[in-house]
Image (spheres, helix red, strand yellow):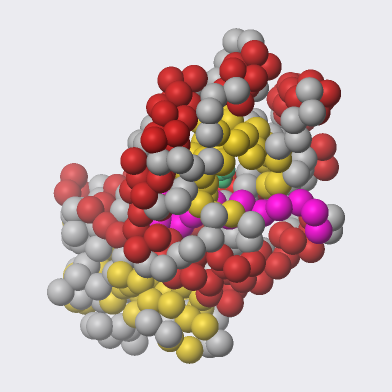
């Protein structure tokens, strides 16, 4: 049987949130916790149950994700970042991010039909080149704001390269300019532009911030010492004693250089353990790092246990997490795979069966 388990410590999640709040100091800055992609592979339902009362908003990518959260009893405000869907917005009491005039008109029409005032956030293009109204921003915002039964609760944008200070300030200043113009017109919506990595710029804080990955314990160059809250584990399926010169896996990219003990683990690229990790990654067995050897297969991966002769079948293997003095983070795996920790968390966490820890005990 396949065994791939993610263990998520909800107390660490809450501590990370608390650390972000302390870093922000100014209590007036609202927190929009980003829980898209099933809370970056951590399981949105449990994550939201843990944090919903400690944040101002939750944010998901699509209405469908919000619908699942509502059905799970999550009743806080939910911002929907990237969806044109109209009916679910009303059905599940969601706050859509509006990125086009058409979309705003469709929402307004439905709000009138339902005799409701719908709060929206308007996304404006400042240099991300993804979604957001563009062209004459002020005119379009005014046009949207004038549509019946819509209330512009927020105006937002997204930073595209926080490593570049000059560019980031160009984006910040574009949003600031809109803010000043709208304020002069007597409009005072919430402004927000910063995800986790923008939090280091005080000028990017505006009225709210939208941390995602930081909540889950990755600080992306920010001086907040958050801790990863997810570990991903599997178990040894088999251990084989192979002579020197044996070839391992497809393509024979690894040949044993000594008489070896090769462990087989029941996970592979179908589980989000990327094939690009072949001959690059390490896993932890008995508090010790051991290397992945040979190509990663669809459902199986081989590890070199030669220096760990006491290892046993069924024993725990940590793919992501820490044990004793050894640690493997999503950043490590991302470096080995040539990608970013976001992709590791969503892939590996996304596929794993989840268990949650609170107060040091498993709660589900
Ligand atoms: C994903 C996302 C975030 C969160 O980004 P992190 O880097 O994980 O903090 C914030 N805002 C928008 C619009 C996003 O798409």
Q: Is residue 353 above or below residue 185?
A: below
Residue plotted at (54% across, 24% down): 147
Q: Quadrant of the C terminus?
A: bottom left
Residue 301's spot in the image, x, y percent?
25, 61
Q: As rendered, which of 39 and 52 lies closer to the eye? A: 52
Region of the chain picked out in magenta, as a range: 27-42
Residue plotted at (30% across, 70% down): 353
Residue plotted at (63% across, 61% down): 55
- Indicate yes or no whether the magenta region holds residue 358: no
Q: Is residue 124 above or below residue 75?
A: above
Q: Is residue 43 above or below residue 357?
A: above
Q: Relative to residue 307, is residue 100 drawn left or right?
A: right
Residue 128's spot in the image, x, y percent?
58, 25
Q: Which quadrant of the structure image shows residue 219?
A: bottom right
- The answer to whether residue 128 of the structure is visible from this angle is no
The number of numbered badges drawn on the structure is: 0
Q: Residue furthest top?
A: 135
- The answer to whether residue 120 of the structure is visible from this angle is yes
Q: Quadrant of ligand 1?
A: top right
- Indicate yes or no whether the magenta region holds residue 32: yes
Residue 108's spot in the image, x, y percent?
47, 30
Residue plotted at (15% across, 74% down): 1
């Amino acid at each position: 049987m396949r065994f791939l388990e993610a263990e998520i410590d909800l107390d660490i999640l809450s501590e990370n949130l608390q650390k972000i709040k302390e870093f922000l100091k100014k209590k007036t800055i609202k927190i929009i916790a980003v829980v898209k992609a099933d809370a970056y592979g951590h399981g949105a339902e449990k994550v939201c149950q843990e944090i919903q009362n400690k944040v101002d908003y939750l944010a998901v990518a699509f209405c469908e994700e919000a619908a699942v959260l509502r059905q799970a009893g999550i009743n806080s405000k939910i911002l929907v970042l990237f969806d044109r869907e109209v009916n679910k917005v009303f059905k599940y009491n969601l706050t859509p991010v509006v990125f086009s005039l058409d979309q705003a008109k469709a929402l307004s029409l439905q709000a009138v039909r339902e005799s409701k005032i719908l709060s929206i956030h308007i996304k404006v293009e400042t240099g991300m080149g993804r979604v957001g109204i563009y062209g004459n921003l002020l005119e379009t915002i005014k046009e949207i704001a004038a549509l019946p039964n819509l209330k512009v609760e927020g105006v937002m944008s997204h930073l595209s390269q926080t490593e570049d200070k000059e560019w980031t300030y160009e984006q910040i200043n574009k949003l600031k300019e809109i803010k000043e113009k709208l304020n002069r017109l007597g409009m005072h919506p919430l402004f927000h532009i910063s995800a986790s990595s923008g939090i280091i710029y005080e000028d990017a804080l505006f009225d709210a911030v939208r941390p995602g990955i930081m909540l889950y314990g990755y600080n992306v160059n920010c001086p907040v010492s958050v801790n990863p809250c997810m570990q991903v584990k599997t178990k040894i399926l088999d251990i084989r004693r192979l002579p020197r010169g044996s070839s391992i896996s497809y393509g024979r990219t690894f040949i044993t250089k000594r008489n070896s003990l090769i462990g087989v683990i029941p996970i592979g690229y179908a589980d989000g353990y990327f094939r690009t990790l072949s001959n690059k990654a390490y896993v932890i067995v008995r508090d010790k790092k051991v290397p992945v050897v040979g190509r990663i297969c669809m459902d199986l991966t081989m590890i070199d246990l030669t220096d760990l002769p006491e290892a046993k079948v069924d024993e725990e293997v940590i793919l992501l997490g820490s044990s004793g003095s050894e640690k493997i983070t999503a950043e490590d795996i991302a470096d080995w795979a040539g990608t970013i920790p976001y992709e590791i968390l969503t892939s590996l966490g996304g596929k794993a069966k989840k268990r949650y820890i609170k107060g040091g005990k498993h709660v589900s």
